Image (spheres, helix red, strand yellow):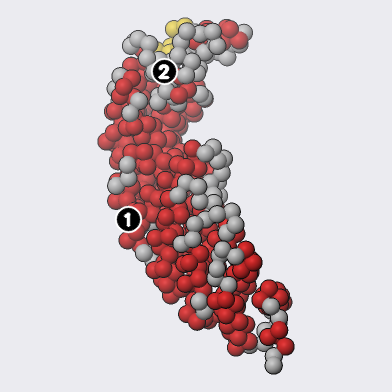
Amino acid sequence: MNPEDSIDDSERIKLLMEQFKSKVFQSKDEIFSALDAIGKIISRNSDFLNSTQLSVATDCLRVIRQACPQGADVQSYIVNALPVIGFIESVFTTALKDANKQLYLVSLQVLANLIINHSSNQQVIWGHFNQLLVKFLQASDFPHKDMCLMLLHNIYCVGGLIQDNGKDFLKLLLQILEEEIHNGKSTIPEFLQLFLEHFVTKQKRVTPMYMLLSSNERILLLNFVSDLIKENHSGDTVVTTELLQCISKEFKKKSDCILKTETTYLNCIEPKEVMALVEVISQASADKSYKHVFADDGSLFLNIGCLLRNVQALGKNGENIFSPIQKLEQIAPSSTSNAEFEADVSYSLKTMLVRSIGNLACRNSKNQDLAREMEIMMAVLDCTHMDARNPLIKEWSILAIRNLCEGNMENQQLIASLTKVGDADNSDILKEFNIDLGSMRINPSV
């Protein structure tokens, strides 16, 4: 009689776990024999109503999780020779409760280890668990979403399988991202970040997927792209040229809608989408990794410049969401003005437009000339005053003027021809702070 036959399941599992941790096995046959023992214990402890058996089953999966790094042949043996896949399926078809929450987690970890660098296991596991994994990700209260995302990421992004599911996966990821934002999460879960990065930096045919998204989904993705560009200081993660060109095209097609100042219209989704589009352009055009994307897109430069001119004209035509806020009394707590101007769809619009103009004109003689010929330079010069509705617009305007004039004598002569006609409009707010910054209001000399 084998002495181990007298050991109960709990003790046998502890022994096997220690053996895998210590890597005492001399051959793969010994590993397979140990895994066979685990398979038999799993078969004897599949009743989840019994707390002892639940604990034993969880420990069995921990041993299997520990065995996976032993090699691809061990991963294959676990999937093909042990009752693990069927067992985990039965786990996932049992309602998630506090008692089996840990079993759910370890089951997902086992599946994740089984598919690492193993394409055939990826296909088997996707075939068995695709509906369950999607169901878990769609559930707002499922506690192990990042593990599910890890599985899908390895199958779709690393393994390159199920590529036809791309659009559905992207929509699902954006749904999860929206939930994270709604719940006030300050950071995105690791594999949600990695999965979304794959779509915007490596995914082929991403533009058709983008165009099939709803407006709200596009805004979520655009905000993600903007943050990715802003935070990617090393330049290791680069958004695809295809997607950025699509964003440019969409902005040119939709930008005019921002000029419709009716409150009912501005509360709809399309102007918010335009704001998200111009935010990406203002970020990407400042990054040397994307200089080639917009360098020859003169129509984008013209569109942005003309939009700035029109926004300024609207702002001067009575009080509206484009009118500059230049007095402290307009933003004081006791003010009768709209105290929620930061929530307006137009908030920071002119800042982003001016920033984009400055970026796109940097060492680009074609855009510099367009700025002069289409009076875009004058629109930028008109932004060199403080405006609470457009933070840092004065600073971005000065930088834009510098870029518009660098190496361009005609633009420099235009600036030189300007004459001072009085203090700039921001003098009121400066006087309230008792500050003199030497600001000027400028008009072309006649």
Q: Residues within 10 Å of mark 1 (few under 14, many from 20)?
A: few
- Write down the residue under mark 2: 382
Q: Which residue lies furthest to the front in this view?
A: 50
Q: Where is residue 211 in the image (x, y as percent from the top left)?
A: 30, 46
What kind of residue is marked 1?
A: Arg
Which secondary structure lies at badge 2? loop
Describe residue 316's horizontal placement relative to residue 74 as left or right.
left
Describe residue 165's horizontal placement relative to residue 1 as left or right.
left
Describe residue 434's horizontal placement relative to residue 381 as left or right.
right
Q: Can I make out residue 37 in this image? A: yes
Look at 52% across and 56% down and name the residue there. Answer: 96
- Write down the residue under mark 1: 205
Look at 60% across and 77% down and name the residue there. Answer: 41
Look at 41% across and 71% down and name the residue there. Answer: 123
Give the answer, above or below, for where 363 lies relative to 124: above
Q: Position of residue 436 (x, y in %)?
A: 59, 11
Q: Where is residue 408 in the image (x, y as percent from the top left)?
A: 40, 31
**Dot in front, 1 or 2:** 1
Give the answer, above or below, for where 214 lies relative to 352: below
Q: Quadrant of residue 431 in the image?
A: top right
244 or 344, which lies in front?
344
Q: From mark 1 to mark 2, how far is it between C-alphas?
A: 41 Å
Q: Position of residue 264 (x, y in %)?
A: 31, 22
Give the answer, above or below, for where 353 lies relative to 313: below
What kind of residue is marked 2?
A: Asp
